[in-house]
Amino acid sequence: MKLNFYGGVNEIGGNKILVNDKNLSNSSKDTSLFLDFGMSFSKAGSYFSEFLQPRKLNGVMDFIELGLLPKIKGIYREDYLKHCGINSPEEPSVDGVLLSHAHMDHCSYIHHLREDIPIFMQKESEIILKVLEETGKGSFAEIINLKKSFHYVPKKSEGYKKLIGEDSKIKRKIVTVDAYSPIEINGFKITSIPVDHSLPGSSAYFLENDNEAIVYTGDIRFHGRNKKCSDKFVTESQKFNPTIMLCEGTRINEKEKKSEKDIEIEATNLLKNHKGFAIVNYPIRDLDRLITFYNVAKNTDRILAINSKQAYMLELLENEKSIEKNKYPHLKDSNVCVYFPRKKQGLISGKHYVCYDGNWKILDSDDDEIQKDYEKWERKFLDSDNFITYKDLKESPSKYIFRCDFFELKELIDIKPKNGIYIHSLTEPFNEEMEIDFNRVQNWLKRFNLLPIHKMHVSGHGSGVEILNMIREINPEKLYPIHTEHPESFNVLKDEGIEIIHPKLSY
C-alpha cells in the first residue's frame, strides 16, 4: 500500500490523495484510487487571480508547470493532451475518484480528468454539481459533463466549424453511491459514510482490502443539523478498526462550538422586532444555512427570498426519490419565494423604451419577451406564483428576508432599502482577494445605510477538541493529518499509542 499526496498537505483544501495497492492477492491489476481531486486555493492564488487565469489553449500544461496538478500519465482528458501534441493512453491509469463533497477544494480539478474515470459520489453532491455546471459560466467547471474542446466538424456547405453546445458534451462516468452500501472496486471494498458538513452529500469513506483498512474523513463537523451522521460515522469507524486514518484538521487549534441552532436563535432575536428591510448573505450550497434562515423567516413572519439558482437546486433535490422528503423547504411553501433581478432589457420591471427605425417607443413587457431575458433553466420559475422583483422588496420591506450574495449587491440600487439590517453569514476573509471583496461589500452597505454588519456564522469543520476526541474514539493504528495548516497539533496523540505520520507532497 502506498499513499501519494498531491494536495491537502500543510494547507486547508486541495485534497488529491492517491491510494495505490500493488500487492493485491485477488487481482492481476494494481488498484489506484484518488480521494478527491480538488483545487488548492492557496497555491492557485500564488499565481492566478480573477483576471489572470490559466490558458485553456495549453490544456493541463499550465497547471502541471506550476505544480497545481500532478504529472501522472493516463488520467487527463484526451482533447487537452492531443491539442498539445501529447498522446493519450487507451485506458485510464486510475480506477476512480472517491468524492467526499462538492466544494471546489475537493472537486474542482475533476474538470481536467478523462471522462472514463469513474467519479463516485452521493446523489446530493451530483445534484449540486449539476446545478453549478448548468447555471455557471466558468472556464474550468466541467465536472458532471465534459465538453470536447479543439474539435471541428464539417459544415453543411464547404469547410469546418467548431464543435460547440450539446453536440460537444460527453457525460462523465458518475457513479452514485448509497450510504453504508459497500461496493467493490478492483479488490477494494468501498463504503460511503454520510457526515455533517456545510453542504448536502458530504461523505467519509472506508477503504478495505487484504492489506489495509483506511478511514478518510473528508470534511466533518459535529455542530450542524446532521450531527447524528457524524456521530454514527465515529461509531462505525470504531467497528471498522482502521489501520490508517486520513483526518482533516481545519480548525485543530480552535475551540468554538457554536451551532446552526445558535445562528437561528440569534437571527430570530435580531429580526423579530425589526420592521424594516432584512438582507442576508450565506453560501449558495449551504442548505443547512438555508434551512436556518427559512426557520428565521417563519419565526418572524417573513418570507425568505432566494435566487433562481438556489431554487433550481431545491427543485432537483425535491424531485429526487432517493432523498428524504421534506428535508429541505418546498418552493411552494408560503415562507419561500424566488427573487428575479432585472436582466438584459429589464422587461420584468415593466415598460421600457426601445428604438424602432430611429424612434424611441414604449415596449410593453409581455410573457414571451420577459422569458427571453432569462436562461432556459430558470424560466420555469417565472411561471410560478411565488416569484418577486425589486418592486416587492421596495414596497413591502418588512415582509421579506432577502438572500443577497456579493454579485447581487447591485440590486440595492433598485430596492433603495431604508432602515435595513445586513447579516453576514459567511466565513471571514482569509486571503487578500477576499479582503478586497469584503471591503467592497462594506462600501455598498455604507452607501445604502446597512451598517453595522451583523456576523453570524459557524464553520463546516469540527473544533480541535471534537477532532481529537473523534480520533481517540476511532483509535487508528496510523494517523495522517491532512487539510490543515497545523499538523503538529495532532502530535498530542502520540503518547496515546497512535502513530502520527506527517505526509509530504509527492510532486
Image (tube, rainbow, N blue to C red):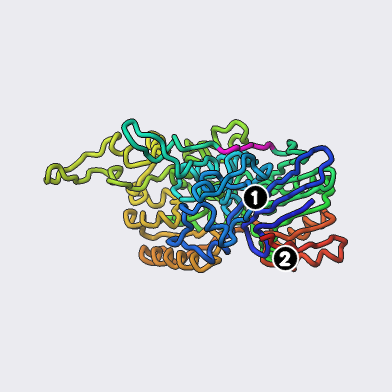
The amino acid pointed to by label 1 is Asp
Q: Quadrant of residue 144?
A: top right
- Give me the residue at 60% from left, 53% from top: 38
- Name the kind of residue labelled 2 in the image: Pro
Whole-percent x, y for residue 343 in the image: 33, 47
Q: Residue at x 48, y 66 (%)?
A: 433
**Category of crowding for the residue at label 2, using alpha-carbon neighbours closer than 10 angstroms: few (below 14), some (14–19), many (at least 20):** many
Give residue 135's quadrant in the image.
top left
What residue did someone put label 1 on? 36
Judge from the rendering whether residue 279 lies leftward or rightward of residue 325; answer left or right.
Answer: left
Which residue is at a point 31% across and 32% down the rendered structure image?
A: 157
Asked if the magenta segment contains residue 242, the reply would be no
Which disc is residue 487 wearing? 2
In the depicted view, which residue is nearer to us: 401 or 444? 444
Among the two numbered marks 1 and 2 on one chain, the one whose residue lies closer to the N terminus: 1
Q: Residue at x 44, y 35 (%)?
A: 166
Q: Which residues are magenta?
A: 172-178
| Frontmost residue, 276 versus 203 | 203
Q: Which disc, if any, is residue 439?
A: none
In the rendered view, tell whether residue 145 sits above or below residue 16: above
Residue 356 in view of the camera: yes
Task: Report whether 90 appears left or right of 269.
Answer: right
Disc 2 is placed on an element classified as helix
Q: CA distance from mark 1 to mark 2?
A: 20 Å
Relative to 159, is 142 on the left or the right?
right
Q: Residue 333 appears at what percent x and percent y?
A: 49, 38
| Residue 175 included in the magenta stretch of the image | yes
Total residue callouts: 2
* Front position in the image: 389 or 171: 171
Image vertical order of residue 145 relative to residue 51, above or below:
above
Q: Nearer the viewer, residue 145 or 466?
A: 145
